[in-house]
Image (cartoon, helix red, strand yellow):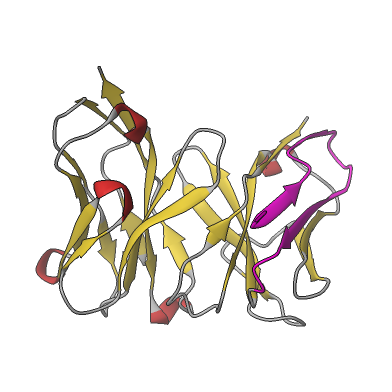
Amino acid sequence: NAGVTQTPKFQVLKTGQSMTLQCAQDMNHNSMYWYRQDPGMGLRLIYYSASEGTTDKGEVPNGYNVSRLNKREFSLRLESAAPSQTSVYFCASSWTSRNTGELFFGEGSRLTVL
Amino acid sequence: AQSVTQPDIHITVSEGASLELRCNYSYGATPYLFWYVQSPGQGLQLLLKYFSGDTLVQGIKGFEAEFKRSQSSFNLRKPSVHWSDAAEYFCAVAAMEYGNKLVFGAGTILRVKS
């Protein structure tokens, strides 16, 4: 059982380049999330999708866009990467967005912007 | 501002010793409370959660946590630490006034001495 799968696991970009992080879950969860993790700051929510067809901003959405492609997939796009976006990105999913349940996380995607 | 505070960035304990990781939150009502663990290079895994009822909750891997409303705390404990417990631990809160999305503390890195 794969759970939450993120690709790529590592990526190096130059400032101004664009890229998309892919995320897929096979648990039939309704809600999906993108977090970034920076040292000493824990995880901060970038965007989330409470259900298929909906997306909402989290705590740090600037510089990112998302697409909930279908129930399984939730992608995160950086249109013009900046060094401040160097981080580890985690995708997560849950049954609902009301957080009465558990979040399941992928293994992370480490992005470096030069 | 709403926040989750983990006062200890690093903690080192000897194998077999007891452990307590501190977590304080600042929300008006009693939120949903969680502890997650992150092993190196991995995503986060839920250890335990508190929604209501008994203020002492048991989790996986022998961990427990106690909710103290008067102190706005949710400290994680383990009676006897094993070397495999070395990881980073995150306290998280889901508060209704924040749309019930998880807000994470900055994390505490646990090192275990043999």
Q: Residue at x 34, y 58 (%)?
A: B4
**What is the x, y in percent for residue B17?**
14, 30
Q: Is residue B85 left or right of residue A27?
A: left
**What is the x, y in percent for residue B95?**
38, 75
Viewer-side residue, B74 vs A56: B74
Q: Quadrant of residue B94?
A: bottom left
Quadrant including the C terminus of chain B: top left
Quadrant including the N terminus of chain B: bottom left
Q: Which residues are magenta?
A: A1-28
Taking the view exactly as shown, the residue that stands out farthest to the front is A1
Viewer-side residue, B112 vs A67: B112
Is B86 located above or below residue A31 in the figure? above
Taking the view exactly as shown, the residue that stands out farthest to the left is B70
**What is the x, y in percent for residue A13?**
83, 35
Q: Is residue B42 left or right of residue B78?
A: right
Q: Residue at x 67, y 54 (%)?
A: A2
Magenta stretch: includes residue B4: no
Is residue B1 visible to us here? no
**What is the x, y in percent for residue B81?**
22, 34
Q: Residue at x 29, y 57 (%)?
A: B59
Q: Quadrant of residue A67?
A: bottom right
Is residue A96 visible to us here? yes
Magenta stretch: includes residue A19: yes
Is B79 located above or below residue B3 in the figure? above
